[in-house]
Amino acid sequence: MKALVIGGTLFIGKRLVKRLLEEGHEVSVFHRQGGHEYGTDVGNFVGDRNDSESVRRAIGGQEFDWVFDNVYDWERGTTAEQVEGTARAFGDGIQRYVFMSSCAVYGEGLDLTEDRPLVPDDFPEPYSAQKAASERALFRMHRDEGFPAVTLRPPFVYGPDNPFYREAFFWDRMRDDRQIIVPGDGSRLMHLVFVNDLVEACLLAASNDAAVGEGFNVGHRRPITQLALVQTLGATAGIEPRTVLLPREDILAAGGEVIGENLYFGIYYDMPSITEDVSKVERVLGLTPTEFETGLADTYAWYLANHERPEIDYSFEDSLLARGAVGS
């Protein structure tokens, strides 16, 4: 198949490109950078995915069988109108348009199935609202015009090449023999997905006709508590983590941030719980999720070989620890 990956140079897109190549597909990437690392085996289209005319000019009338839309512009946002404009830029020839959405389209909640209503357009969190509105636009195109859209709703994605400071946040601190701050009593649930499983879901969504017009939750079969996450990360590294429970309200009152200088638990890792029922993607597409410990082992091996450790300022965490907390 002739495949285009929108955003094929980082994390999910990078692993998707490599997997498509391994399976013998003709692959191109669309991105804002001037070049890519794949050499002449992969086509290169440069433009702004938030500008449908830029997309049309860049692809120059070329047709693709599969289009994987993996990009969200974290600085400007990516609206439903922009997603629809990009989708329409590829004309009527595509067989599948796989859109990377997010579990954030549900807002919050536990054990959610795909028939749960998505958040409305005026939802206060822009990322959630724009992803949900984009899904509605694509499914409207499917309903009215037969457009072959599929959406995937992953929770937190982890794995090799992760650009977000998440797994490495904890491993860096463990290897520095630092205490790990766990907010609240550590019982807040998190749901994660291994990047290789998400890539596999992309391929299954593209190749299986039963996927058309459907949204799919993609993740591990079971969520995990924040405390258990830290303990499992430690077990993967062969380190007993020194965890400290600290009231969430105290952390936030002191200036704690889910992203920013006062990060205390990995980027976005302390958000209201959203957990998903992933039985549909297993039943309809045949995806078998990787065991969490297996995914973490692969991730830790990559971390040891490739992680570029940032300069870490522990002053905020030290100030929290100095306030006193309960060791777990």
Image (cartoon, grey):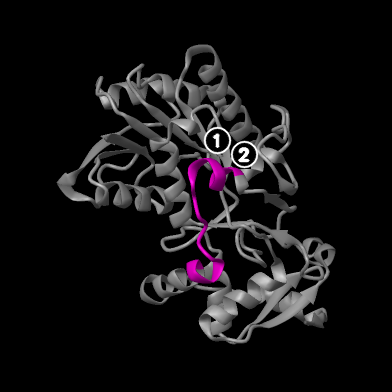
Relative height, residue 25 to residue 323 (above, below): above
Instruction: Identify the mark at residue 282; answer none if there is no mark.
Output: none
Residue at 37% of width from left, 71% of height from top?
306
Residue found at the far left of this picture? 40
Does 250 lie within the magenta span?
no
Image side of residue 213 versus residue 24, left or right: right
In the image, which is nearer the foreground, mark 1 or mark 2? 2
Q: Quick one: label 1 or label 2, which is nearer the N terminus?
A: 1
Circles 1 and 2 in contact, beta carbons < 8 Å: yes
Q: Secondary structure at mark 2?
A: helix
Residue 284 seen in the current view: yes
Residue 35 occupies quadrant: top left
Residue at 76% of width from left, 62% of height from top?
188
Residue at 54% of width from left, 71% of height from top?
293
Q: What amino acid is found at the position of numbered circle 1 in the picture? A: Gly
Residue 100 location in percent, x, y?
50, 39
Residue 122 location in percent, x, y?
73, 28
Instruction: Identify the mark at residue 77; answer none if there is no mark.
Output: 1
Q: What residue did someone put label 2 on? A: 127
Residue 316 seen in the current view: no
Q: What amino acid is found at the position of numbered circle 2 in the picture? A: Tyr
Residue found at the far top of this picture? 144
Residue segment shown in magenta: 280-295
Image side of residue 14 versus residue 168, left or right: left
Q: Main secondary structure of the magenta part?
A: helix
Image side of residue 109 versus residue 31, left or right: right
Residue 319 location in percent, x, y?
74, 76
Residue 46 occupies quadrant: top left
